[in-house]
Amino acid sequence: MKVLLGKIEDPRIVSKLKNTYMASFDFPIYVKEEFLKIYRGIENAIFISLYLLYFGIISGLTALVIFTIRSVMSRKRIIGILKSIGVDSKKIFFIFLFENLTLVILGIVVGLLSGYLESSEVMEYIFNLLGSGRFSFPVFRVLLMVMSVLSLAFIAVGIPSFIASRYSPSENLREIE
């Protein structure tokens, strides 16, 4: 394979030369600008994916809070019965916390697996287009993100669970569902 290298300062001449070669020969001419366009396109796709990830995390945490509050409100009578037979507030707190954090952990596992599989497929496609590249999994960044999501989920679930553990048994038993 023969390669023609050169350096031309004037962009008009570069464009004219590129068009001449592409019209005369049956192969593309790649210029630094073309590679930069490809790189910017890939970089923009990654930024869009990150914003979608953040939107998904915010939406998921909001749904988790709503689900937890609904769960607590629908079980007020059961909480009152449990407290009246002697179950302490800590156990009620941990019941709701365990239930909802189990959902979060399952969601994280499914998200990690599907994200890894999808990312490896997309990157393999991009690397095939570019002709080279190697997919690497950013373990530290993913662990940091998982820990962030778990801590935010703990706060989002912990507040309604704490409120549920502080309900008065007499008030909860008095309410009609």
Image: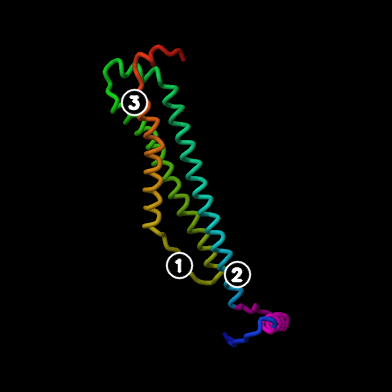
Q: Circle 2: is it few (<14), some (14-19), or many (20+) Cα within 10 Å?
A: few
Give the mark nearest the N terminus, 1 or 2: 2
Asked if the magenta segment contains residue 54, the reply would be no
Instruction: Look at label 1 and name its amino acid.
Output: Arg
| Front of the two marks 1 and 2 | 2
Q: Which residue is mark 2?
A: 37
- The answer for how far apart the CA atoms under marks 3 and 1 are is 51 Å
Q: Circle 3: is it few (<14), some (14-19), or many (20+) Cα within 10 Å?
A: many
Q: Could you say where residue 92 lies in the image, as x and y percent from the top left?
A: 32, 26
Instruction: Look at label 2 and name its amino acid.
Output: Lys
Residue drawn at x 48%, y 40% is: 60
Q: Which residue is mark 3?
A: 165
Q: Circle 1: is it few (<14), some (14-19), or many (20+) Cα within 10 Å?
A: few
> Foreground: 118 or 10?
10
Residue 25 makes an appearance in the image: no
The image quarter containing residue 28 is: bottom right
Q: Which residue is mark 1?
A: 134
Residue drawn at x 31%, y 19% is: 83
Name the secondary structure under disc 1: loop
Q: Is residue 164 above or below residue 158?
A: above
The rendered magenta stretch, by its main secondary structure, is classed as helix
Left or right: where does residue 53 sit relative to residue 109?
right
